Amino acid sequence: MTDTLMTRELTTAELRSKYLEFFRARGHAVIPSASLVPDGDGSVLFTTAGMHPLVPYLMGAPHPAGTRLADSQKCVRTNDIEEVGDLTHLTFFEMLGNWSLGDYGKKESIGWSYEFLTGEEHLGISKDLIWVTVFEGEDGVPRDEEAADIWRSLGFPDDRIIFLGREHNWWAAGPEGPCGPDTEIFIDRTQTPCAEGADKCLPGVCDCGRWFEVWNNVFMSYNKQGEDLLDLPRKNIDTGMGMERTLAVLNGVESVYETSSLKLIVDRMIALSGKARDEVYGDERLLKAVRVLSDHLRTATFMIGDEMSVRPSNTGQGYVLRRIIRRAVRYCDVLGVEPADWVEAANLVIDDYGDHYEELVKARETILAELGGEKDRFSATLAKGTKMLEKEIERLNAEGKTVLEGDVGFRLYDTYGFPVEFTVELLEEAGLALDMDRFEAAFAEHQEKSKSEAAKSGLADDSEESVRYHTATHLLHSALRKVLGDHVHQRGSNINRDRMRFDFNFERAMTKEEVAETEALVQKWIDEDIPVETEVVTVEQAREKGAIGLFNDKYGGEVSIYQIGDASLEFCGGPHVKRTSEIGTFKIKKEQSSSAGVRRIRALIS
């Protein structure tokens, strides 16, 4: 590991501020982070990358804040949750990004990245530590000599400009959608080739630990449709810098858990455990526990405190949150931390991030209540799992067997949330064992399935059917407020070309009459063939007009609002039909509970 690249420790808040102010000074509108819950996108459960909320604008829709944007986007990825506890893996992270929506080109993008990284008034990294990779050309897309020439003009020698193929220097939102070549910027952490030799120890290729990718500039020029690579209506640039991993390298610390915001939580967990720091860091099992507790506390706090607040449940985002909280409670036992104290430590996360993510401060009571409630429910689950395992032990003894089937152990773990460590411990006390080979095989199957689901495109489906469904959510939202009251607000939606799912706050089940009235009102507006009109206004003007939506004063600019006659007026990024008659026939198929205080409607159009 290199020594710190900074003259003093750089904090999370400082890096975020430096980055956003740098691009604000260069004509970028600093936009607020979008919700962790993608609105209208059924392909992923959470916002997994900084570009995810901007896909409609990368595809050509005008952004109300303009053509130059910058933000710090909150993201969640849980496909590698079992890796949390190592040096780099996190479930929640921030992604710093800046975008050109058909505005500036490669010269400005590369030049500004270089200036921010090396400028003494910015990060001040030595140019001698920086290497770059560029696209070497493949499948009919030419070699990116333009990007290479720009790097040469900045003083980079050819031996620090590495040409690589599609596997390394091509970025895509998914199997289909916006994509293009990129240039990636690396910091040389050791300045010494590994045993592979100088010709093979190259950035983007060698994983010996020498290289750290600090920035990725994507020249998003194409739209992948099936096997065809089509030109986008305009050429865009999408860049990304991971907050925590970048801080770790800049500050010269061993892991992301030693960066300012995570270290605050780590220190609190160690203090709550009553153990000495040397004891925790000297024991691999304890060190993993303290990191899992710190990561999961931050993630759960952001999920619950999100504008589209996630609550623990057995499906969708709520299921992921439930698993994260319960996994943390299990690790409380490993580290010797009282679960109630772990819950209370959420205040630390709220206080640290609250200046930038004000929604956390507003949701403080909800965050603590949901964490505490799930902690208590898990205690009951542990008791239930223990009883079930005791029955399995009785069965094994009656059958004269000494090994519990791995599938049974995995079912206890996956379905009931019963930790496998507890299963093994209780079995050993009874002189029995768990078939770990089969358990691990079942777990691997589950993990592979989760990774496959997580790898689905973040691109919102913009098919004709999905656009009709999206517009229908506006009408459904308005109808619910008329039937149930103005206190009803959307809490999330999930749309694909086959159906829609709409979540809203309401404390009880709707009656059959209320469901029928809501459905009839939506259909009435559809049959009236109302035009769907849009305009770009300031946030204050949108409020004055009576538009509803998740407004955020940090926009400081303009927003798009969509009006459907007297039926609906909402802030939204689109896309929509031109007239309501294009939606067709609307049918509510089911109304049910989603989580505490949140109801869910499933509907079809034809």
Image (cartoon, rainbow, N blue to C red):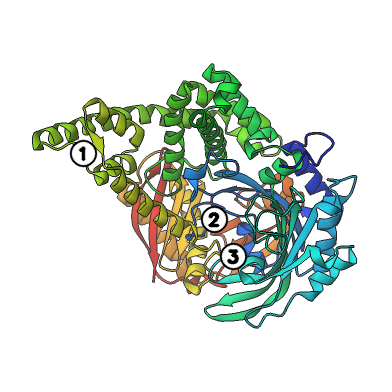
Residue 408 placement: quadrant: top left
* Residue indicated by mark 1: 403
Question: Label 3, label 1: how many angstroms apart (C-alpha)?
Answer: 46 Å
Q: Is residue 504 above or below residue 64?
A: above
What kind of element bears circle 2? loop
Image location (x, y in percent) of residue 82: 47, 44
Where residue 250 sits: x, y (%)?
Answer: 76, 42
Where, by quadrant of the figure, is residue 322 drawn? top left
- Quadrant in which the N terminus appears: top right
Q: Is residue 423 found left or right of 10 in the rendered image? A: left
Quick check: 439 left or right of 370? left
Q: Nearer the viewer, mark 3 or mark 2?
A: 3
Residue 200's disc is none
Residue under the point 49% across and 68% down: 466
Mark positioned earlier in the residue sequence (3 or 1): 3
What kind of element bears circle 1? strand
Find disc 3 in the rendering and name its residue.
173
The residue that appears at 35% across and 33% down in the rendered structure is: 421
Task: List the single residue furthest toward the top.
Answer: 274
Check disc 1: other Cα within 10 Å, few if <14, some if 14-19, many if 20+: some
User: Relative to 482, is 549 on the left or the right?
Assistant: right
Q: Nearer the viewer, mark 3 or mark 1?
A: 1
Q: Which residue bears the numbered disc 2?
A: 39
Q: Is residue 32 in view?
A: yes
